[in-house]
Amino acid sequence: MFKVNDYIVYGMTGVCQITDIAKDEISNNEIQYYVLNPLNNDNLTIKVPVGNNNVSMRPIITKNDILSLIESMPATENIWSDDTRQRSMKFKAALKSGKNEELIKVIMTLSQEREARSMIGKKLTKTDEDIMNTAEKQLTEEFAVVLDISPEEVLHYIREHVPK
């Protein structure tokens, strides 16, 4: 069970802080729920029943986990597919999984493809670009909280720590 002030990753919403654990009575049943405030949206409050296994909610990773992820980046598998529909489904599944390893695969794959296309004067498709931006946002948001830096500093941090 999470505690008040814990940071968690909630589905595709991203990093949220638990601001309260409250109770409501609904149909003579007392329901306990987490009150979440997403870091990227001050105007949104989310209520999630405690023990609801239908939602993707996990604790944020540790600094050691981040360093391990960064260290493994050079060996990251390229998951590119020339089939646009298949690629989009694979990338969207990776986003939905909320797993940092999957987000890194998407980001690394699309970065490599962007670089290859730029050499011949082309760009990524709008869909690929949007998926890459979403993956980067999810990853940098969590890294920033754990490392106590701004999301804008995360890419520099990664570059400084990735093995050459």
Image (cartoon, helix red, strand yellow):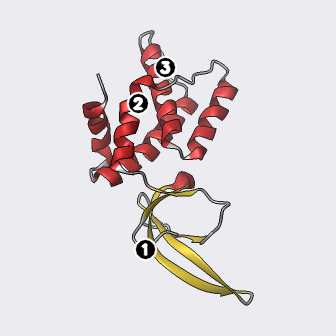
Q: How many marks?
A: 3
Q: Is residue 17 left or right of residue 26?
A: left
Q: Earlier in the sequence, mark 2 or mark 1?
A: 1
Label 3, label 2: how far apart the Cα atoms are? 19 Å
Q: Position of residue 15 (x, y in %)?
A: 45, 56
Is 113 rendered above or below residue 21? above
Camera-nearest label, 2 or 1: 2
User: Which x, y percent locates residue 164?
Assistant: 29, 22
Mark 3 and mark 2 lie on one chain; the one further toward the N terminus is 2
Inter-mark Cα distance, 2 to 1: 33 Å
* Relative to 27, residue 108 above or below: above
Q: Which residue is mark 1?
A: 4
The residue lying toward the viewer, choosing from 98 and 138, is: 98
Q: Return the mark for residue 125.
A: none
Q: Residue at x 63, y 27 (%)?
A: 87
Marks 3/2 in contact by CB < 8 Å: the verdict is: no
Task: Identify the element where label 3 is drawn.
Answer: helix
Of residues 155 and 4, the one nearer the viewer is 4
Residue 84's x, y, as percent? Answer: 65, 24
Residue 113 is labelled as 3
* Res. 99 in view: yes
Residue 72 bears which disc, if any? Answer: 2
Residue at screen point 73% across, 90% down: 28
Density class for disc 2 (Cα within 10 Å; few <14, some 14-19, many ≥20) is some
Q: Considering depth in this image, is 39 or 74 the residue closer to the camera? A: 74
